[in-house]
Amino acid sequence: MSGRGPSLSLIERIAASITSCSPAEARVGKLLLEDPRRFATQPIAELARLSGVSKPTVVRFCRHIGYKGLLDFKLKLAGVINEGIPYVHRAVTPGDTAGELTIKVIDNSVSALLHLRNQLSTSNVNQAARSLMATIQAGRRIEFYGVGNSGIVAQDAQHKFFRLGCNTVAYADAHMQVMAASLLEPDDCAVFISNSGRMRDLLETMDAVRRRRATAIAITASGSPLAERADILLAADHREDFDRYSPMVSRLLHLMIVDVLTTAVALQLGPELTTRLSQIKRNLRVKYAADATD
């Protein structure tokens, strides 16, 4: 399977190939998908027993997915797991123990972050960082827009860029967003943060930003209406069902993209930023020292 593209992880490719397996081989594949770590450590007799198939069927499954046999496949599988590469989205179920749900939630988050690392467009990151830097150098405004959970991320982004010395503000209220967008100028930047990229209020605000000819950066799902309207897209794609579950994974992805952007801009600011941050720390130390003596 080494000749295949890197867009899908090993287990994702196996999941996609199960439909072409025989019913018996498919049972082996399903056992693998339930717990790849356990599959990698079990002997062939135990794998056959747990799958309800014969030992030769386990070997045929490994050959079907492109490996010489069980040993060859388990070596690859162990390497994938040890490297921390995402293997499968594991939704929690009502019967999960605390230990099981802890593993699943953390594994899902790690998987999503690694997927972001591999898929995030570095050219778009560079373009966004250059636009934000140009806005800072021009003394113009950087505004962050988000609603609900994304509004929290927008506030975090505003805080980070504020520490860089930027003229920045975050809006979570739909009316304030439209009003603020209507006052932007071409040298300003507006950063939209949305899980689904489909909220009507944000889309209306995006349209207002575009009419003002300010730069619109979107941190959202690729292919969404918000993404299609943006000048620069920083795609945060994941398997989380935003119609059914609270956006835990998406929030982590959005926060990570904000950190990437903040770091990229901070590096461009250079020694000037170091001096500014040192002054902030000195002033905070003086404040806390004064509070302690009151």
Image (cartoon, rainbow, N blue to C red):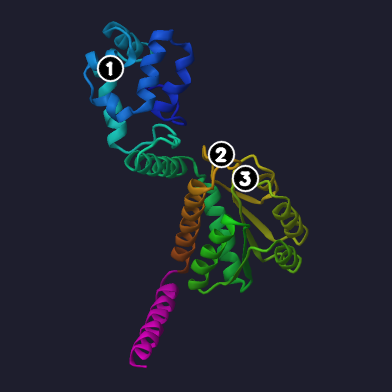
* Residue indicated by mark 3: 196
The image quadrant that residue 101 belongs to is: top left
* Magenta extent: 270-294
Q: Position of residue 197 (x, y in %)?
A: 65, 47
Query: Label 2 crowding class (10 Å Cα cut-off): few <14, some 14-19, many 20+?
Result: few
Tell me the residue at 38%/26% (across/down): 34
Outermost residue, front direction? 95
Tell me the residue at 38%/39% (across/down): 104
* Residue indicated by mark 1: 47
Query: Label 3 crowding class (10 Å Cα cut-off): few <14, some 14-19, many 20+?
Result: many
Let me know if residue 4 appears in the view: no
Let me know if residue 45 appears in the view: yes
Q: CA distance from mark 1 to mark 2?
A: 32 Å
Q: Which disc number belongs to residue 219?
A: none
Q: CA distance from mark 3 to mark 1?
A: 40 Å
* Residue indicated by mark 2: 241
Q: CA distance from mark 2 to mark 3?
A: 9 Å
Eyeballing the image, is 34 above or below 193? above
Q: Is residue 279 magenta?
A: yes
Q: Is residue 17 left or right of residue 42?
A: right
Tell me the residue at 42%/32% (across/down): 88
Callout 3: SS: loop
